[in-house]
Image: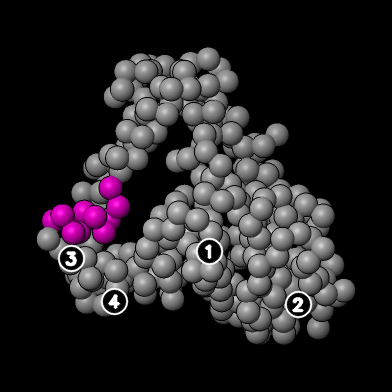
């Protein structure tokens, strides 16, 4: 059973209408302000400083506030103040539905309890599949950093939907990119995008809005994948002593055009979706194909 989002769950149970969900999602989006926006509006940072912080986030795996402190744009105390403001202003989809009058508070609490029970088993099953893979630290590291870097660099939260081990299904969407790594282990990281999430990724990395997928948009996504794989390689080196070298990211249109070395024996693919865009095509799949390290 694939993971469901709360809005989809409510729709299927007949608790809300589609238009009510769309209205609540838009209300939630407008109410939840990014930390950089709060800092700009409060006079903590300038636009140029915010752009510099976001560019630096593409290079290192750190949160917006951490980078701001590292660059000496903010003090740790100022970051805490901004986070407190953000926390007080942030609302969930359920709160948005209540505020818009589409659900009562009592109904929300009841539906959330049912939803949580349904989801826990699905999520545990997906992560159990990853943990059962040979050398599980490899797919776990890539999955963890992919989710974190989408949150930090692209400003979207992703949740696991389902997993599989079928190499013939690592290209479920139109836009695909992979990056090979070699050294103590050999493998490649494949990310398959739907068009909306491709354009959003490119826009955030390049700090300009893309409306269509052109060479500049591809460069932005190529840079993002390079950051994901580079950080994963560094983490595996630090935690597991695996030395890896990276090859340039490449786009491909079908499984027939991807270069998969014969030595690769394992595949772990995880489908991810963005709950903030649950009625749109905001999905992607990250697949790790690798050869486990040889026993010493």
Left or right of 235 in this view: 102:
left
Q: Residue 45 has which mark?
A: 3
Residue to which mark 1 is pinned: 214
Give the mark nearer the N terminus: 2 vs 1: 2
Q: CA distance from mark 2 to mark 1?
A: 31 Å
Is mark 3 in CB contact (under 8 Å) with mark 2?
A: no
Residue to which mark 2 is pinned: 186
Residue to which mark 4 is pinned: 70
Q: Which residues are magenta?
A: 33-42
Q: Residue at x 46, y 18 (%)?
A: 16
Q: Of the residues tagged 3 and 2, which is closer to the observer?
A: 3
Q: Main secondary structure of the magenta part?
A: helix
Left or right of 204 in this view: 48:
left
Answer yes or no: is residue 140 visible. no
Q: Of the residues tagged 1 and 4, which is closer to the observer?
A: 1
Left or right of 93 in this view: 217:
right
Whether 180 is drawn above or below 193: the answer is: below
Examine the image and state in which quarter residue 238 appears: bottom right
Which residue is farthest right? Answer: 262
Give the mark nearer the N terminus: 4 vs 3: 3
């Amino acid at each position: 059973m694939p993971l469901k989002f709360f809005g989809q769950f409510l729709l299927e149970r007949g608790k809300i209408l589609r238009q009510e969900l769309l209205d609540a999602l838009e209300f939630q989006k407008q109410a939840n302000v990014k930390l950089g926006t709060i800092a700009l509006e409060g006079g903590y940072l300038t636009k140029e400083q915010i752009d510099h912080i976001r560019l630096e986030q593409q290079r290192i795996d750190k949160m917006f506030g951490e980078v701001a402190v590292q660059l000496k744009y903010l003090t740790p105390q100022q970051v805490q103040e901004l986070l407190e403001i953000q926390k007080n202003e942030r609302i969930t989809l359920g709160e948005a539905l209540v505020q818009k009058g589409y659900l009562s508070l009592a109904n929300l609490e009841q539906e959330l309890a049912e939803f949580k029970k349904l989801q826990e088993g699905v999520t545990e099953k997906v992560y159990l599949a990853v943990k059962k893979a040979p050398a599980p630290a490899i797919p776990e590291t890539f999955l963890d950093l992919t989710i974190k870097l989408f949150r930090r660099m692209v400003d979207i939260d992703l949740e696991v939907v389902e997993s599989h081990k079928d190499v013939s299904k690592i290209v479920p969407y139109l836009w695909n990119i992979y990056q090979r790594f070699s050294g103590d282990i050999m493998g490649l990281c494949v990310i398959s995008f739907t068009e909306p999430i491709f354009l959003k990724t490119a826009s955030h990395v390049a700090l300009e809005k893309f409306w269509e997928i052109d060479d500049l948009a591809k460069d932005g996504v190529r840079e993002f994948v390079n950051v994901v794989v580079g950080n994963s390689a560094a983490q595996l080196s630090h935690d597991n002593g695996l030395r890896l070298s990276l090859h340039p990211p490449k786009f491909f249109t079908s499984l027939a055009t991807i270069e998969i070395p014969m030595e690769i024996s394992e595949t772990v693919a995880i489908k991810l979706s963005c709950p903030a865009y649950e009625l749109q095509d905001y999905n992607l799949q990250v697949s790790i194909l690798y050869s486990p390290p040889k026993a010493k």
